Image (cartoon, helix red, strand yellow):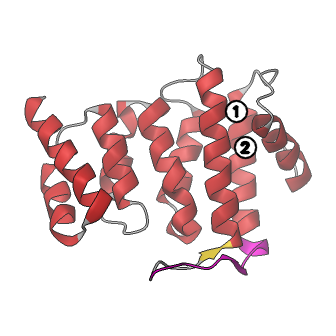
Amino acid sequence: MTNVEEGVKIVEAVEHLDLSIHNENIVALAVSTLCPYWTDALQSIGMKGELGAPDWRRYELKIWELGESLRLYLKKQKSWRGPSTLFDAIAQVMGTKVYGKGRQTFALLLGDFGGSSYSRDLGRAIEDPEVVGHAIKALTKLRAAGYELEVRKAMSIYSGWIRAAAKKYLSISSAV
């Protein structure tokens, strides 16, 4: 893939659940090409935060939507599971802080489809306030033990759904 236009075509096919894409490396390359492009090109506010929530930049929305499109696609493309170039690209996006809140869906993708080999990436994300809850949910789905200390720390900082996700992780990790 040499340019953004090709990446956009691949992402459009993913969005339309076009299962004729047989090479997940092409999708990985589209993800790796478009996320930095959108970050540079779409800096304006995309959605105002309400009730004290932070604003979302347009690039964060695009990246978040890409992750959601990938989730729907991967539910259909059942042969694309576990460690691969695609999930390496997804882990890279999730770990790149400049992509902000857009990375939330990427954390969930690792838990739903990536497999336990991405537990370390998710464990590091527990300390990232923009993806902490999503990382804990993903680790819980993977039944990945070993992050109890980090999750307890997050539970002492956060409330609401993140605290509930942390409690669930701790109850499952103690049973593993």
Spatial distance from mark 2 to mark 1, Cα to Cα?
Answer: 6 Å
- Image position of 28 with respect to 79: above or below: below
Q: Residue at x 27, y 50 (%)?
A: 165
Which picture quadrant has residue 46?
bottom right
Kind of residue at badge 2:
Leu
Q: Which residue is mark 2?
A: 29
Quadrant (top left, top right, bottom left, bottom right) of the N terminus: top right
- What secondary structure is found at the residue carrying circle 2? helix
**Residue 17 badge:** none
Going 16% across and 35% down the picture, which residue do you hit? Answer: 172
What span is colored magenta in the figure? 40-51
Q: Report crowding for label 1: few under 14, some 14 to 19, many 20 or more residues within 10 A (C-alpha).
A: some
> In the displayed image of the protein, which residue is found farthest to the right?
5
- Tell me the tag on residue 25: 1
Question: Looking at the image, can residue 147 be seen?
Answer: no
Q: Is residue 116 magenta?
A: no
Residue drawn 52% across and 62% down? Answer: 96
Question: Does residue 3 appear anywhere in the picture?
Answer: yes
**Three-letter residue code for mark 1:** Asn
Instruction: Please indicate whether residue 106 sits to the left or right of residue 166 in the image.
Output: right
Callout 2 touching callout 1 (CB < 8 Å): yes
